[in-house]
Image (cartoon, rainbow, N blue to C red):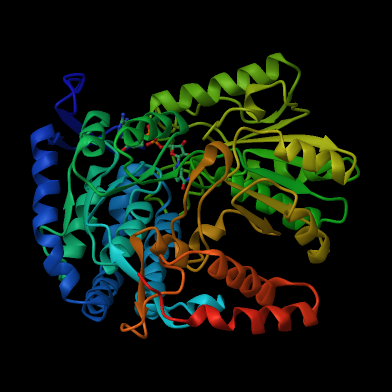
């Protein structure tokens, strides 16, 4: 049961991080509310499953249409609650969801259909096998604030099209965007009991984990993910965990410095660095190091920091004071251990209380917190390297393994190196945008998580796989049933020889000797 530790606050407060304006206060769902929502989803889910994939795809088409019509309204709601530039809300949230719907509309029917499973084993040739995909029932989704629309929506669309009901517990900082998603889905034809939002804080999330959901898709920090995994283990609740990252960017000696520095600046500062796929560690070959730093500093100084609703803004505010303090402490630690602060390194109180100046640090090393812990803020820490071997070791020297990027004019070299980097995704000559490729699986290794969202592997996470096997001659007893004895054992040895012996004469002999194995069984 969810416990009485769930006391903290009974209200969540939605704020504009750029101005500090309170947008709305909402009551937290109680444990009983959460359990009731899950129960309601369970009762309605069978009917939703019964309507079939094609009808659910029609609902997705309508959702796509509604979202397209309301794209600016939705993007504005995202900017208000997160502070990110309006253009980023359009590209990294609205567009991602429209395209994710496109992927499911085009592929869900095929990917969810039964699949024949031919047998290679001669002993099983008289059987027909098939794979059947069934929805879990109710999928719980717990999501973070940094992509408050695209993360829960892409997960929910996959869960819904597969025939599940969904109960979403959004971040306490971005409840309004989640409610916007709810109204879009309901308007598109998803029944109210099939997609429900339970607004609340960590305690509300904990109640969802303790409820009768059939699977959980969690996106958030490693520490919360581990806590959730421990609770889930008690009843073997299946979980997908999309956790933090400390993504390395490897700029090889043949990279285009202008392109790579623009990529680094965008990858480190978009969404004010609050992206799980952000460039959090940048390694540059020593031959390019000073030139690269100079280009990054020039480009960083040109960035316009401000309110995301202003179309001139490149970098918005951070989400809250706690996140700012983490960034400050990482920068202070790095500078105190010898890092060079090339630009930034302080708050921009004149712009607003949550703004931090985009920061470039040089000469960092792995002793510093900024190269080990997730910073999740607008900081680009850069370190030189001399050889490919060295940079691969540096990239892999991390608890995390979400994504990485390699920058080189030689794609073949980049792809070869990609195989040696421990991460769920490697991009060559780009960064972050893999999240917008609806076909690509998203997820990490090591502490960055378990399982995948997006694409066919993300859809696969939303169904149970069932194997159904039909015997083509129901009247026949199987030869491996009872009726053992010396003759049967000899025949089986011969049968195994007929299938697996290295020499053809031995196989032929085995086939002849085993022919009698097909006699009918006495039991
Ligand atoms: P968080 O872990 O603090 O919170 C995430 C969600 O979990 C919120 O909805 C929160 O209310 C809920 N929660 C908190 N305690 C809980 C508990 N005990 N039981 C159940 N739910 C609980 O993370 P955050 O600050 O919202 O998000 C930032 C983190 O998310 C970063 O580490 C970032 O890297 C990660 N993230 C990962 C991905 C990915 O795809 N891998 C994407 C976005 C963000």
* Residue lying farthest to the front in this orientation: 486
Quadrant the C terminus occupies: bottom left
Quarter-of-image position of residue 412: bottom right
Residue at screen point 24% across, 66% down: 163
Residue at screen point 72% across, 81% down: 509
Quarter-of-image position of residue 144: top left
Residue at screen point 24% across, 79% down: 58
Count of picture labels: 0
For residue 437, above or below residue 267: below
For residue 381, above or below residue 153: above
Left or right, residue 199 beside residue 115: left
Residue 334 in view (yes/no) = yes
Residue 19 in view (yes/no) = no
Residue 132: give x, y in percent of width and height: 34, 71
Left or right, residue 130 beside residue 258: left
Along the line of sight, the residue nearer the viewer: 237 or 75: 237
Residue 295: give x, y in percent of width and height: 76, 46
Q: Quadrant of ligand 1?
A: top left
Quadrant the N terminus occupies: top left
Residue 492: give x, y in percent of width and height: 58, 70
Left or right, residue 182 beside residue 448: left
């Amino acid at each position: 049961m969810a416990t009485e530790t769930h006391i903290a606050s009974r209200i969540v407060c939605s704020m504009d991080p750029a101005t500090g304006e309170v947008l709305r206060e909402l009551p937290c769902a109680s444990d009983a509310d959460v359990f009731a929502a899950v129960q309601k989803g369970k009762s309605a889910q069978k009917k939703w499953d019964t309507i079939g994939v094609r009808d659910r795809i029609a609902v997705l088409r309508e959702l796509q249409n509604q979202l397209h019509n309301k794209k600016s309204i939705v993007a504005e709601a995202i900017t208000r609650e997160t502070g990110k530039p309006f253009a980023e809300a359009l590209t990294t949230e609205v567009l991602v969801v429209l395209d994710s719907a496109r992927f499911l509309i085009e592929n869900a029917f095929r990917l969810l259909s039964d699949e024949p499973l031919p047998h290679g084993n001669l002993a099983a040739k008289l059987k027909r096998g098939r794979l059947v995909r069934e929805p879990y029932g109710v999928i719980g989704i717990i999501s973070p604030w940094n992509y408050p629309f695209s993360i829960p929506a892409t997960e929910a669309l996959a869960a819904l099209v597969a025939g599940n009901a969904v109960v979403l517990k959004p971040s306490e900082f971005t409840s309004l965007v989640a409610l916007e998603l709810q109204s879009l889905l309901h308007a598109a034809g998803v029944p109210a009991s099939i997609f429900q939002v339970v607004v609340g804080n960590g305690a509300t999330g904990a109640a969802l984990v303790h409820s009768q959901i059939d699977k959980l898709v969690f996106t958030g920090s490693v520490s919360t993910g581990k806590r959730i995994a421990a609770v889930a283990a008690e009843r073997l609740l299946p979980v997908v965990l999309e956790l933090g990252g400390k993504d390395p960017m490897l700029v090889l000696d043949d990279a285009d410095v202008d392109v790579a520095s623009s990529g680094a600046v965008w990858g480190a500062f978009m969404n004010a660095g609050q992206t799980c796929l952000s460039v959090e560690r940048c390694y540059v070959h020593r031959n390019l190091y000073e030139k690269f730093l100079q280009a990054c500093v020039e480009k960083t100084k040109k960035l316009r920091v401000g309110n995301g609703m202003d179309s001139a803004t490149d970098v918005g505010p951070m989400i809250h004071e706690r996140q700012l303090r983490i960034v400050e402490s990482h920068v202070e630690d790095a500078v105190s251990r010898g890092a060079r602060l090339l630009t930034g390194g302080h708050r921009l109180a004149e712009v607003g209380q949550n703004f931090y100046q985009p920061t470039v640090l040089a000469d960092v090393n792995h002793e510093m917190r900024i190269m080990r812990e997730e910073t999740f803020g607008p900081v680009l820490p850069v370190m030189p390297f001399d050889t490919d071997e060295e940079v691969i070791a540096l990239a892999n020297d991390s608890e995390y393994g979400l994504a990485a990027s390699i920058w080189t004019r030689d794609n073949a070299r980049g792809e070869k190196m990609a195989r040696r980097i421990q991460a769920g995704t490697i991009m060559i000559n780009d960064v972050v945008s893999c999240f917008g490729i609806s076909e690509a699986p998203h997820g990490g290794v090591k502490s960055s998580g378990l399982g995948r969202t997006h694409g066919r592997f993300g859809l696969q996470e939303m169904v149970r796989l069932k194997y159904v096997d039909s015997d083509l001659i129901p009247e026949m007893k199987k030869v491996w049933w009872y009726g053992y004895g010396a003759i049967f054992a000899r025949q089986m040895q011969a049968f195994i020889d007929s299938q697996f012996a290295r020499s053809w004469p031995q196989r032929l002999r085995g086939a002849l000797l085993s022919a009698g194995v097909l006699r009918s069984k006495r039991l």
